Image (tube, helix red, strand yellow):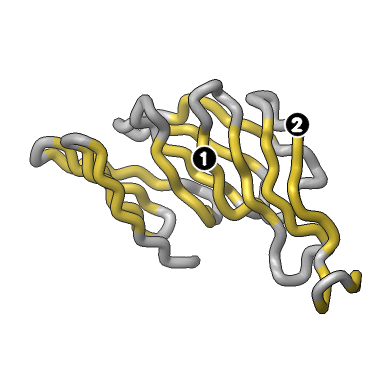
Amino acid sequence: MHIITVFIFLALLTSVYIDDRVALLQGGAVTKWQIDEEVRGLSVTKTHSVLATCVHIHEIREFSTSGTLLRRIQLAQDVLSPWHAIQLSGGQFIVCHGGRDDPVHRVCLIGSDGNVLKSYGGVRTTRFGQST
């Protein structure tokens, strides 16, 4: 398992994420829960829910601050190795994806249904302007 540590400060909400467990500190109380997939990126939405980017299953999971799974957003199959997602104010997502061995590395605008609306990037290159 990979160890992920992120500190996020939003008003009185402090969130600490370690490994595949999530711990939220709110007003002295700590809430913890397990995520059963490998998570590469974590972010907090404007409504304080937690987004977990699950790399191997091409999915974004949204959790409440109490750890309740609110929804799963299945990403399009061409979104290889997603490693971070943030939610925009309109409900869409920005997702960065592409691992070391993946042929495509992009930053994508993703709809709430998981489909790519726009993307920047493409085929990985070995040198500037030269495709592999």
Taking 92 as reference, is 15 left or right?
left
Q: Percent from the top left, x then y, of residue 125?
A: 83, 71
| Quadrant into which the C terminus falls | bottom right
Q: Residue at x 71, y 71 (%)?
A: 100
Q: Residue at x 41, y 62 (%)?
A: 4
Along the viewing direction, whichever of 48 and 2 lies nearer the viewer: 48
Q: Residue at x 89, y 73 (%)?
A: 130
List the residue tagged with mark 2: 117
CB atoms of marks 1 and 2 within 8 Å: no
Q: Amino acid at mark 2?
A: Leu
Q: Amino acid at mark 1?
A: Ile
Q: Locate residue 11: give its quadrant.
A: top left
List the residue tagged with mark 1: 86
Numbered label attached to residue 24 = none
In the displayed orientation, state which residue is furthest to the top: 90
SS category of the residue bearing label 2: strand
CA neighbours of label 1 inside 10 A, class few (<14), some (14 to 19), many (20+)? many
